[in-house]
Structures are given as structure tokens and as C-alpha cells.
Amino acid sequence: MALLIIFHFTATSDVPFDYLNMSNKDIARLNLALFTYGLPIFLLVTTTYEVIFRFNVYKYKITPPPNIPVLSNPTPKIPVCPVCYLIISIIILFLTIYMVYFGHGVYNEIINAKNT
């Protein structure tokens, strides 16, 4: 996200073009690639972790599971509905896979357009 913010600000001011040695069109393409590839792939990685986490919650019947590192409170609790969360995380994983596919199509359509 920090890289996205940096490139957004470089596209709006004239000074960084001298430092980066890039044109407005190059930075616009880089921003397009970040939005159509970077964000969906980041979501794909995080939802993959979520599916693995939810599968282990389903398997061990406690949250957080003992074999997955988490950044929250490590005291184990009994989950409310581990099957529901596993199914929801798998559905979200499929939606992010489609978002990567859709982003690839959008990127190619914009780059290959005659009027851009």
C-alpha cells in the first residue's frame, strides 16, 4: 500500500519525474498495474492464509490453532461455527481468484486500446 501511495503522489506532482526518470504515461501504467495486479494478488495471498487458518480451526476445534502463527490474542477458544467460516473463506478465495483474472483482462484491454 505504501508503494501505491508513493506512485500516486509521483503521478500528481512534476518534481519526482526528474528523480525517477519516468514519464507521466509510464507512471500511469505502473499505477494501473498496481491496481489491476498488485491489489488482487495481495488479496489472494491473504485469503489463502485465511483458508489455511480456517481449515486448521475446523481441524483442531479451537481458535487460534496451535500450528498457525497469529498476531492476536493466543488464548485458545472454542469457535462458534468453524464450518461456516471455512466455507465463507473458500468462497472469498474463489472470488479473489476471479478478481485476479478480471484484473488481468482489464489491464490488457486498457493497454491494447487504440485511444490511450
Image (cartoon, rainbow, N blue to C red):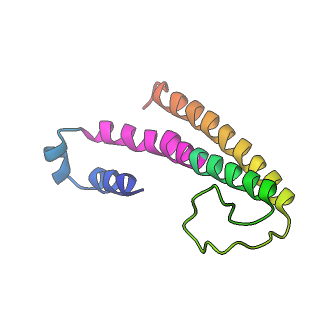
Region rendered in magenta:
23-43
- Residue shown at the point (16%, 53%) measured from the top left: 15
| Magenta stretch, main secondary structure class | helix
How many numbered circles does the render carry? 0
Q: Is residue 30 magenta?
A: yes
- Residue shown at the point (49%, 27%) measured from the top left: 113
Q: Position of residue 71 (x, y in %)?
A: 54, 67
Q: Nearer the viewer, residue 32 or 91?
A: 91
Q: Nearer the viewer, residue 57 or 35?
A: 57
Q: Is residue 32 left or right of residue 53?
A: left
- Where, quadrant-wise, is the N terminus in this rendering? bottom left
Q: Quadrant of residue 80?
A: bottom right
Q: Is residue 41 magenta?
A: yes
- Where, quadrant-wise, is the C terminus in this rendering? top left
Q: Position of residue 47 (x, y in %)?
A: 64, 50
Q: Nearer the viewer, residue 35 or 12?
A: 35
29, above or below 52, in the image: above
Q: Quadrant of residue 53?
A: bottom right
Q: Position of residue 67 (x, y in %)?
A: 64, 55
Q: Is residue 61 left or right of residue 68?
A: right
Q: Nearer the viewer, residue 64 or 29?
A: 64
Q: Is residue 80 left or right of residue 1?
A: right
Q: Is residue 10 left or right of residue 86?
A: left
- Residue shown at the point (63%, 36%) measured from the top left: 102
Q: Position of residue 25 (x, y in %)?
A: 32, 37
